[in-house]
Image: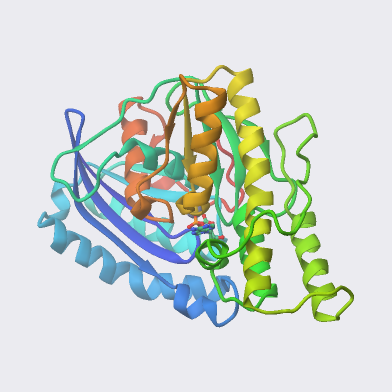
Amino acid sequence: MIILAIETSCDETAVAIVEFQRGKVKVLANIVSSQVKMHSKYGGVVPSLASRMHLKNITPILQRAFRNAKISQKKIDYIAVTNGPGLIPALMVGVGAAKALAYGIGKPLIGIHHIEGHIYANWLKKCDDEKNKLWQGEFPLLCLTVSGGHTQIILMKKDLNYQVLGETLDDAVGEAFDKVAKLLGLGYPGGPIIEKMAKKGDEEKIKFPRPMANSGDYNFSFSGLKTAVLYEVQNCRNKAMPCSYDDQYKQDVVASFQKAAFDVLVSKTIKAAEKYKVKNIVLGGGVSANKRLQKLLADAIKSNLPACGFSFPQSKLTSDNALMIALAAFQHVKYEKGIKTWKSVTADANLKLK
Ligand code: KG4
Ligand code: ZN
């Protein structure tokens, strides 16, 4: 069975063509065209520019995907597309292209929730290989999804079954990384830059708050942490405290900020995992690329829940891509959920995970 998947929810135009056969996965094409260079000039994603770039790129990328896969359109069995959540002008380009393709070749269309894709990115254990294995999943399973738009703890009792236990009440954790990088003049996107700089800093140097660490629920808040970083930096710059605003200082600030953010993510994930007695914890989303987060969570699982499994996606699959959308779509086909025609799939910026 061959699935063609499209992802355009933010600033990556992505197409994948993937063959699923008896538990084996063959990635026939996997193209991601990033617009990051263009948006970095503005310090963040500009939705109208994103949609213009998706429109310019989507057809050539589809053509290239078919060339790479060396198959004709007739061989495609299902088309899948991220239909939300995300930037509506960006989503509409991918959904429009997917609908036209589904109509043109007369095949079913599956709308995929973006976070579902980030979760199922974990199901592929090796990329590039001709014979990737598909993980079966061991439930109950807890997902910590951390991206530029989301921070959620999700309980899955079985495939395609999602219960959001908690989420951020304001900024997503990736958004906080981007904003802290911006206020220090470090560039966009902030996450990878902060991770690299933090390695040279002392994460215990500045005592930033751990927002909502003891709130008794699984919700998060990162806006106050970002403001605490802003005040700290302003006080240093204005000489309101003895401090020199140099590289070492900035490295200590980002390391301490990163540790504060991750401490809350890790402690709440462990609490939820204990309460729901999960067999596995999986990470997903752009921030899951962060090695410090991977290590902190792995260590916490080892000491608190030694029998619990832990997975994070391969680095290629942490940021937005269409292969993860194909992996989620495969589950929809397997369980016959959400298989529609081109007529009934629409883009929804606020799509809920159901
Ligand atoms: O999942 P993603 O590619 O797009 C969204 O769905 O939002 O996530 C992008 C976010 C950005 O905020 C970026 O700064 C963050 O993921 N990010 C990281 C790292 N790599 C990307 N944050 C922390 N450490 C990283 N290594
Ligand atoms: Zn994403």
Figure check: 232 above or below 352: below
Residue at 46% over, 19% down? 307
Quadrant where the N terminus sits is top left
**Residue shown at the point (75%, 38%) measured from the top left:** 213
Q: Is residue 139 visible?
A: yes
Judging depth in this view, the residue of 285 and 289 nearest the camera is 289
Q: Which residue ends up furthest to the front in the rendered image?
A: 242
351 versus 34 height, above or below: above
Q: Is there any visible trace of residue 115 in the rendered image? A: no
Residue 30 in the image, given as x and y percentages of width and height: 26, 56
Residue 231: % across, % down:
83, 68
> x, y (%) of residue 127?
24, 48
Image quarter of the C terminus:
top right
Q: Give 140 or 108, whichever is nearer the viewer.
A: 140
Question: How far across and how far down the image is residue 123, in percent?
Answer: 34, 36
287 to 333, vertically: above or below:
below
Q: Judge by depth and name the residue closer to the eye, 254 or 174.
A: 254
- Residue at 48%, 22% in the rendered image: 306
- Camera-side residue: 3 or 100? 3
Residue drawn at (35%, 60%), measured in percent from left and top? Answer: 14
